[in-house]
Image: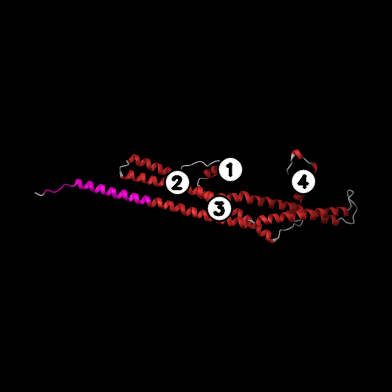
Amino acid sequence: MNINLPHFNMKNLVKEAGSTISRVVQLTEEKLGTTERTEYDLHFQNLAERADVTKAWTEKLVKDTESVLIPNPQNRVEDYIFEKIDKSKPKRVSNLEHLALDMIEAGGDFGQDLPYGQALIKVGQAEQKLGQCEHDFIATSGICFTQPLRKFLEGEMKTISKERGILDSKRLDLDACKNRVKKARSMLGQQSKDGISPEAALEQAERDLRVAQAEFDRQSEITKLLLDGISTSQASHLRHLHAFIQTQVRYYKQCGDVMEQLQRELAKLSTRHQQQVSCTLCRMVPVPSLS
């Protein structure tokens, strides 16, 4: 119930309170099975069910994708808050990058000229590249997939839920008016009550019913149009899914390229080390005397 103090209107307040009470009574009687209710047509029910399924699965897909991209739930919550307040997300060092830094530092301490130290540094540098690839993948996936789906949930689906709620209220108003008309008809032929004749009461109830029916029909059409729009939204979601897969393919290819390059560099180090060992052994072996 909204009360705008600068334009407070007691008549509107009473009318809104009366409508709320009428809806509560109507809903209670429906749950008790003591009154009839207007049922939505089969097409509308199918659209509404599809909307509910779409909402539930989209929420789960967004949550699951974000769990894959950012496994730490605390980081996901932190990123969501930063996104809401329009601030850039903090730059975090991933576990992979922590490993890379430690490998590079260990390689330096073990000796950059020694095989193990050289290998550790090479591997650490490769892990750093993988870490950057991971950052790029997470950022791009958010832009091309999870953010559009979340925007759909927070925009279009919220609007649909709001309009469906209004439609339910209009439906309760309509059925309450239908019941008042039935009651007024049953009173025909009886004495006037509270100075209002049964005929006048019926005429007023029928006017209210016509208004309620018109408002219900109008809201029903609005809601149907929004529900029909989900098909268009799913076509957009399909494009976002393709973009996500392209991002994933590019990410794994970049990682594969980094690892293949690392393998070649490690193989060169190994060959060089073997050659150094062979030369050292050659110098150590005494040359036999010819005499």
**Is residue 165 rendered to the left or right of residue 266?**
right
Does dot 1 land on a helix, a strand or a loop? Answer: helix
In the image, which disc is placed on residue 31? none
Residue appearing at x 23%, y 47% in the figure: 279
User: Quarter of the image containing the N terminus?
Assistant: top right
* Residue type pointed to by label 3: Leu
Q: Amino acid at mark 4?
A: Glu
**Along the viewing direction, whichever of 71 and 124 lies nearer the viewer:** 124
Q: Single out the mark in the foreground, 3 or 2.
A: 2
Colour mapping used in the image: secondary structure
Q: Amino acid at mark 1?
A: Lys
- Using a 10 Å C-alpha cutoff, classify the residue at mark 2 as few (fewer than 14 neighbours), some (14 to 19) or many (20 or more): some
- Please name the residue that numbered disc 4 is placed on: 16
Kindly report the distance in space between the C-alpha atoms of the residues bearing marks 3 and 2. Answer: 25 Å
Magenta stretch, main secondary structure class? helix
Q: Which mark is residue 61?
A: 3
Which dot marks residue 132?
A: 2
Residue located at (54% from left, 43% from top)? 79
- Residue under the image location 74 percent in, 52 percent down: 170
Q: Residue at x 64, y 50 (%)?
A: 158
Mark 2–mark 1 CB contact (< 8 Å): no
Q: For marks 2 and 4, give the one nearer the viewer.
A: 2
Question: Does label 1 or label 4 sit earlier along the sequence?
Answer: 4
Viewer-nearest of labels 1 and 4?
1
Disc 2 versus disc 4: distance between alpha carbons?
Answer: 58 Å
Residue 169 picture location, percent across and down: 73, 51
| 204 vs 141, nearest the viewer | 141
> Are there few (<14), some (14-19), or many (20+) residues within 10 Å of tag 1?
few
- Where disc 4 sits, the SS reads helix
Q: Mark number for residue 84?
A: 1
Mark closest to the chain's N terminus, 2 or 4: 4
- Tag 2: residue type? Gln
